[in-house]
Image (cartoon, grey):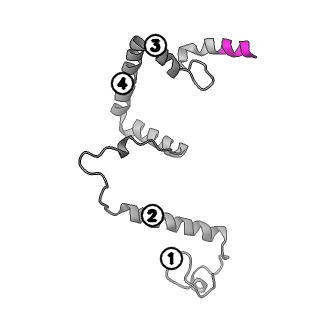
Amino acid sequence: MSRNELCYCGSGRKRKKCHKEVHNNSYIEILSNLYQAIENEKTYNSRDKEHPCKNGCFNCCYDAFIISMLEFEYILYDLRKNHKEIIEDVFNAALEGEKLLKEQDPELLNYFVKDATGLDARMESREANQKMINKRT
């Protein structure tokens, strides 16, 4: 970027009159450009848009998608802070589901409570798991 081009910061001034001390493609310029791109995206996403779903549509509601650990932590934070009743409802539904599985398909329940190592993931099984690990080693 030459000194006579508009400054990367978005001020509308020429670079030589604004941020002349910042080197071209420096970390500061790159970071500033990244923040500007984020702000542009936030502005774009804050505008009202017509939602693609129509009456009776539900496909997106059941799609699986990947989230980052940071997004997961934020969702947990929000649920804990603002939606304790939802957490209680989900927890109670899970307990009911476990009870139903225990009655109707205990083999399937056992499949779900094992973790990737094949060990029982329930809290009360930790001692038994440790014995199994000790036998393997």
Q: Give the mark toward the camera: 3 or 1.
A: 3
106 falls in the magenta region: no
Q: Earlier in the sequence, mark 1 or mark 4?
A: 1
The residue indicated by pointer 1 is 10
Q: Do labels 3 and 2 touch, CB within 8 Å?
A: no
**Residues under labels 1 and 4: Cα distance?**
52 Å
Residue drawn at x 45%, y 67% is 40
Q: Judge from the rendering whether residue 44 lies leftward or rightward of residue 37; answer left or right.
A: left
The residue indicated by pointer 2 is 41
Q: Which residues are magenta?
A: 130-137
Q: Give the mark toward the camera: 1 or 4.
A: 4
**Residues under labels 3 and 1: Cα distance?**
63 Å
Q: Amino acid at mark 4?
A: Ala
- Check the image and report above or below for 80 versus 24: above
The residue indicated by pointer 4 is 93
Q: Quadrant of the C terminus?
A: top right
Q: Do labels 3 and 1 touch, CB within 8 Å?
A: no
Element under disc 4:
helix
The residue indicated by pointer 3 is 106
**Most frequent secondary structure within the magenta stretch:** helix
- Check the image and report above or below for 113 versus 55: above
Q: Give the mark toward the camera: 3 or 2.
A: 3
Q: Earlier in the sequence, mark 2 or mark 1?
A: 1
Element under disc 3:
helix
